[in-house]
Image (cartoon, rainbow, N blue to C red):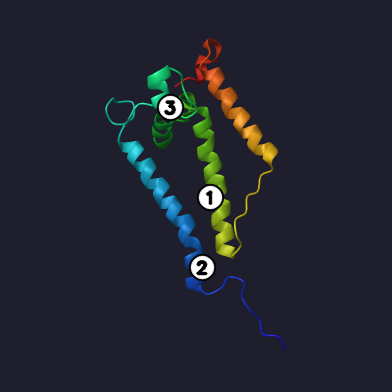
Amino acid sequence: MVPRTTQAGPPAGRLRRLATPLGILATVTAAFAYVGTVDPNEPGHYPVCPLLKITGAFCPGCGGLRSAHAFIHGDLGAAFSANAVATTGYFLFAAVWVIWLVRAWRGQPLRIVLAPVWWWGIGALLLIFTVVRNLPFGSALAP
């Protein structure tokens, strides 16, 4: 007769597996809480984007803090208006985090493998976003 084993493992092992995703969530929550309480729309709280200061051009991250502030306050329209890529990233992070947590609970590693073509596509998308938001017809994408 073969002894039965549980897949979940002992509670201490499960807590150890959950420590990293829960730690990441705590860190992200603290960062969003700070940005939610310290308004980036008021001058003097955060540094100015170096690329914007030197060239006057918006980088892909410009407006990210204003986007996070609006997102925390439940204003998705303002969040998308400030930085559509960042706002999309919040939802993507949440989905990946939930998958990570479930897999950690089950004792399975999180493996996200993207083929190089996907990385090139993401880079191209960010480049197009950056160029378009700096052109007159793409002003709706500017923060």
Q: Amino acid at mark 2?
A: Arg
Q: Amino acid at mark 3?
A: Gly
Q: CA separation, marks 1 and 2?
A: 16 Å
Q: CA separation, marks 1 and 3?
A: 23 Å
Where disc 2 sits, the SS reads: helix
Q: Can you tell which quarter of the image residue 71 is in?
A: top left
Q: Residue at x 40, y 29 (%)?
A: 66
Instruction: Tell me the quadrant of the picture where the N terminus can be found.
Output: bottom right
Where disc 3 sits, the SS reads: loop
Q: Which residue is mark 1?
A: 97
Name, please, the residue furthest toward the bottom: 1
Q: Which residue is mark 2?
A: 14
Q: Residue at x 43, y 27 (%)?
A: 63
Q: Which residue is mark 3?
A: 63
Q: Can you tell which quarter of the image residue 50 is in?
A: top left
Front position among marks 3 and 2: 3
Label 1, residues with CA under 10 Å away: few <14, some 14-19, many ≥20:
some
Label 3, residues with CA under 10 Å away: few <14, some 14-19, many ≥20:
many
Instruction: Tell me the quadrant of the picture where the C terminus can be found.
Output: top left
